[in-house]
Structures are given as structure tokens and as C-alpha cells.
Amino acid sequence: MTTQEDTGQLEGKVSSAIRWSAINSLLQRLSAVGISILLARLIAPEQFGVFAVALVVLNIVLSVSELGVSAALVRHNGPIDEMAPTVTTLSLASGSLLALICVLGAPWFSNAMDAPEAAGIIQLMSIALVIAGATAVPGALMQRNFRQDHKFYADTAAFVAGTAVAVVLALMGFGAWSLAWQRIAQNLSAAVIMFWLTKERFRPGWNRVQAKELLAFGLPLAGSSLLVLGVMNVDYIVVGAMLGTVPLGFYLLAFNLASWPVAAFSAPVRSVSLAAFSKVREDPELFQRSFGRALGLLALVTVPACVLLAALAEPLIRVVYGERWAPAAAALALLVLLGAVRVALELGYDFLASAGRSRAILVIHVVWIGALVPLLALGAHLDGIRGVAAAHVVVAVLIITPAYLITFKPYGIRAGALGTRLLRPFLGGVLMVAVVLVVRNMIDSEVLQILVGGALSCLAYALVVFPMRHEILAVLKKRADA
């Protein structure tokens, strides 16, 4: 059982880590939105579509680049001196091998996606796989030790370097290559800072027994990560193959915008949730309670952001990105709903991973992608990029959410209890939609629709969730005490 003193110390570390991660995530997202607006005006939609093809490959392969073994390092509560060298070897070897496969397979994949110009970009971006393998252990140690302040420094350096490279190359007319070199500059800069700030140094080593244990836990998790990225990237393949690179560019912009709440609010919590859940998994009551509380607090801040993006999708796209990007609004509202559901599902992923249920996670994601692919194709055929977005929402809400709830049952987590925690944010979100719709019907100016609708709907939301202020104040008090 976890003692009260241990719990207090853990909450202090977690609170500090979340604070740093929240600052990092918020600044990164705000900065990224600004840069994306600039790049959208410098780079044509079809070039974004070419980059999206390469990004599909990179994201999917990155999900398995270290075979899931770094998560085992984060989850482990004992000494890591014997485990870390084996993790280093596995992550380096797998990252290098996958990079070679990407280099050799790039022409085939790009031709299959009817975007042959993406082949060179895929080959360039495969360098990121080697970097990911080299930084797997330092990254895991930051997460394990709740050093999100160090991650903040690494991400800031990455943003500065990547932005400089992307803007200069875009102004010079390099198109999609600007975005590819931006990614490489970001990864290299972050890697340098991570190694500089991580005191522990582990050279590659090998322990057959530990390697077997690591792979037994990590491979199902890596398979799940591959499927997660497949779920979040297979839509690009469907859109590119069935609708072409220009609709793919619009869809990529909409998906990136819809992911903003996930990155801004879910990412800070996920940066510590696996380690935090792992610390309390021996205390069943605290383990179960920690998930419900984290989900409730996440919903409190995620719902208003998602509602604003969805309800104001059309004016936001036109005002911020320009009229030529207006078709992206067709998919944005539905993709924002998917983003809201993802926040909850990703927290559930970390909860099950901390409990050692990597096989259950794998099964859920096999079901997810198996149900998703045919519905995405049907959606694209019936209603273009909006139909693709609708298919995503249907599968996530009607199939995957119930699957997680079934898997939660052995840990005492019930749908009714979670629903009680989510009730006020949900009702507040419904009221926000009503307020925005009224404002949009009364005001013609799109800029005023955004400003007035956003302000009034947020005020309405605050009135509904006001009774939840005690939970927020409790968290803030623990941060202050820490």
C-alpha cells in the first residue's frame, strides 16, 4: 500500500511535471499555429499533400522504432542500471533497420500513393528514426523522473531551429522539402539538448533474459503504437489514394487543427501519466481513483477548446488561413469531436499500459483499425473528406470507447462513475454550441463571430462547470504545497 507521505511526494513531483509540460505544450502549440499559418501562406496546398504522404510513413514507422521497450523502462519501479543498456541496443538497432527499410521502400510507397515526388522526402525524413533510437533512453529517463522541465528546454530548442529552417527554405521556394528539413532540424536539436541534460549515460549492452522480458512487454505495446499511428494516419492514405493530393492537403490542415486540444491538454498529462499510474498501481483504490480524477480534469479544459474549434470551424479557417483553405472546414468540426474522444482514450491507454495490459491494448487497436479502414473508404466515396472524418468518429465512439470500458472493469472503473465526472463539462459544451450558433445567426462579420461567439460561449461554459472549482483548487493547493 502507498503511504500518505509517499502519495504526497508523488503528487508533488507529478504536479511539477504537469505544470512544466502544460507550459511547454501551450507555448509549443501556440507557436506552431502561428508558424503553420505563415507556412500555409507560403506553401501551396498540393505541397502540403506531398508532405502528408511522407509524414504518414514517418509517423507510422516511428511508432515502433524502439519496439516499445522505452515504456518498460518508464514503468519499471526498481533500479535500471542493468536494463538500460539492453534498451539502448534494442532501440538503436530497430531505429536504424527501419530507417534503411524506409530508404529502400520510399519509391514504391510514394508511387502507390500517386505522389512519386514524395520519395526523396521520405528518404530524408528516415533520419528521424535513427535519432529516435538514439534518444529513446534519455527520453524515457526524463519521463520516469518527471523532468518535464528538461523536455521543455529540448522542445524549445527544437522549435527555434525547426522554424528557422522551415521559413527560410519556404521563402526560397523549396515547398514540401521545407517541412521535411524542419522535422530533421527539430529532431537533431532536441536530441542534443536531451543528451546534454541527462546525467546518466548508458552504452549499448545485452542481457538475454532482460531482452526477452522487455520484448514480451514491449512488442505488444509497439504493435499497439503502430496500430494507433495506423488509426491516425490510414485516413491520409485513403484520402490521398481516393481523392488526390489537393483534398489531402485540406484534410491534413483540418486534422492538425483538430489535434490542437489533444496536444495542448492531453499531452501534458500523458507526459507523466504512465509513470504516475505505475507508481500507485499496487494500491487498487488509489489506482482506480487516479484515473477518474485525471479524466474529469482533462475534460474540464478540453471540452471548451474542442467546442470552439468545431462550432467556429468555417470562420476560423477563412479568417486565419485564407479563402483558399476554406474546404478544410468541411472535415474540421467532426475531427475536433474525434480529438475530444482521443483525449480520454489515450489516458486509458496509459492506464492499461501501467497495469501491464499491453496485450489488451493490442487487441483493442486491432479491432479499431479493422473496423476503421472500410468505413473510411465508404466515407470518402460518399462525402469526401467530411465522410472520412465522420467514419473516424463513428468507430471511436461506438466501438472503441465501449471496448476500453470493458477492459477497465477489473480495476473498478465503471461507465456510470466516469459519466458523473464528465456530466458538467458535457452540458457546458452543449450550451457553448447553442450560444455560438445564435451569435453566428445574428452577426455577419466572421471576425466578430469568432470574438463574440468565443467570449460568450466560454462565459456560459464557466457558469455550468463552476461547481467543479473545488477540484481545481485542490490541485492548485497541492502544487503550492509541493
Image (tube, rainbow, N blue to C red):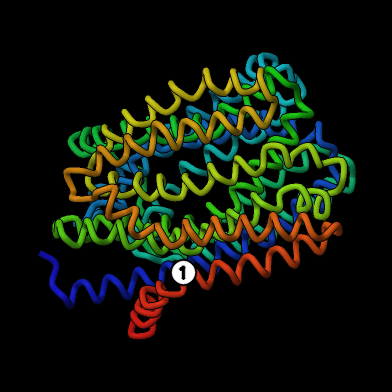
- Where does residue 370 sit, x and y in percent of width and height? 43, 21
Q: Residue at x 21, y 72 (%)?
A: 7
Q: Residue furthest left?
A: 1
Relative depth, front residue between 458 and 200: 458
Q: Is residue 295 left or right of residue 156?
A: left
Q: Is residue 220 above or below residue 349?
A: above
Q: Is residue 6 above or below residue 87?
A: below
Is any part of residue 219 visible from this angle?
A: no
Where's the N terminus, which quadrant? bottom left
Number of on-image labels? 1
Q: Residue furthest right?
A: 172
- Where does residue 14 sit, x and y in percent of width and height? 35, 68
Q: Amino acid at mark 1?
A: Val
Relative depth, front residue between 283 and 394: 394
Local crowd at mark 1 within 10 Å, few (<14), some, or many (≥20)?
A: some
Where's the C terminus, which quadrant? bottom left
- Where does residue 26 sit, x and y in percent of width and height? 59, 64
Q: Is residue 93 above or below residue 345?
A: above
Is any part of residue 475 visible from this angle?
A: yes
Q: Residue at x 76, y 53 (%)?
A: 316
Q: Residue at x 71, y 49 (%)?
A: 313
What residue does disc 1 label?
465
- Where does residue 285 sit, x and y in percent of width and height? 16, 60
Q: Secondary structure at mark 1?
A: helix
- Residue 376 falls in which quadrant of the image? top right
Relative depth, front residue between 293 and 169: 293
- Residue 467 falls in which quadrant of the image? bottom left
Q: Is residue 282 left or right of residue 341?
A: left
Q: Residue at x 53, y 42 (%)?
A: 338
